[in-house]
Image (tube, helix red, strand yellow):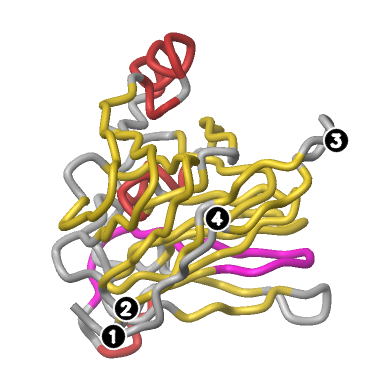
Amino acid sequence: MGSGAKSTHGCCSLHPGDGYLRSVATFRLQGSKVLAVDMTGDAVKAKHGSMVAYDGQIAFKKLSGGGEGLRGMVTRRLTGEQMTVMEARGQGTCWFADRASEINLVSLRGEKLYVESSNLLVTDAGLRTGTTFTGLRGASQGNGLFTTTVEGHGQAALLSDGPAVVLRVSAQYPLTVDPGAYIAHQGDVRQSFQSGVTFRTFLGEGGGEAFQIRFEGDGLVYVQPSERNTIAGDV
């Protein structure tokens, strides 16, 4: 394991809407491929099977429906957006990793994050997860027509194949992304889809019909430097 000062105390924050303080897990990276989470009686939700080590008194349990209960289980079965999640709760430190993928931390302050379920590693238990319609973007990636949402106040850890790049979208500078490189986005962003010419076409390697994602508005888009396989052509 990499080095890093271990927190001896968890932090507390004002839980929006209830006026009470609650303990919040502390997320910290050890290197770029291992996430350490310090807990003081609180909980996190993590990708099932991603725990690699822990100390202290921490209990684990599998959650149904992506951690959203019965309603989430039904929704995810209907939409095809699969996500197997476990809860880690207690006092101590838990280390998470997944196939030596890079880990990227995102802090949410009430906004909503849209992320592919396969790229979601750990979230603060206080964050709400759900599903939303994505249309052709999800279909082009082979992930179905729906994707996962994460919303509220807390931290989320995202996986990427190689170090993720965070790109700004603004009214003056819309962004076009290869669907195989897309991980997540947040902010007031609109998506549209372009077909035909792809990035590889310019290199003489493209073939067949393919999609690109165009983002407009004001927000952030997370992309990875390695493309996943898609079903919308050689993208």
- Tag 3 and tag 1, C-beta contact below 8 Å: no
Q: CA distance from mark 3 to mark 2?
A: 33 Å
Q: Earlier in the sequence, mark 2 or mark 4?
A: 2
Is any part of residue 197 visible from this angle? no
Label ID, residue 193: 4
Specify whether residue 214 is painted magenta: yes
Q: CA distance from mark 4 to mark 1?
A: 44 Å
Residue 128 percent coordinates (x, y) = 59, 35
Q: CA distance from mark 4 to mark 3?
A: 43 Å
Amino acid type, residue under disc 2 in the picture: Gln
Amino acid type, residue under disc 4 in the picture: Phe
* Residue position marked by numbered label 1 in the rendering: 3
- Tag 1 and tag 2, C-beta contact below 8 Å: yes
Q: Nearer the viewer, mark 4 or mark 1?
A: 1
Specify whether residue 167 is painted magenta: no
Rendered residue at 18%/77% (across/down): 1
Q: Earlier in the sequence, mark 1 or mark 2?
A: 1
Looking at the figure, which quarter contains the C terminus? bottom left
Question: Local crowd at mark 1 within 10 Å, few (<14), some, or many (≥20)?
Answer: few
SS at circle 1: loop
Rendered residue at 74%/42% (across/down): 21
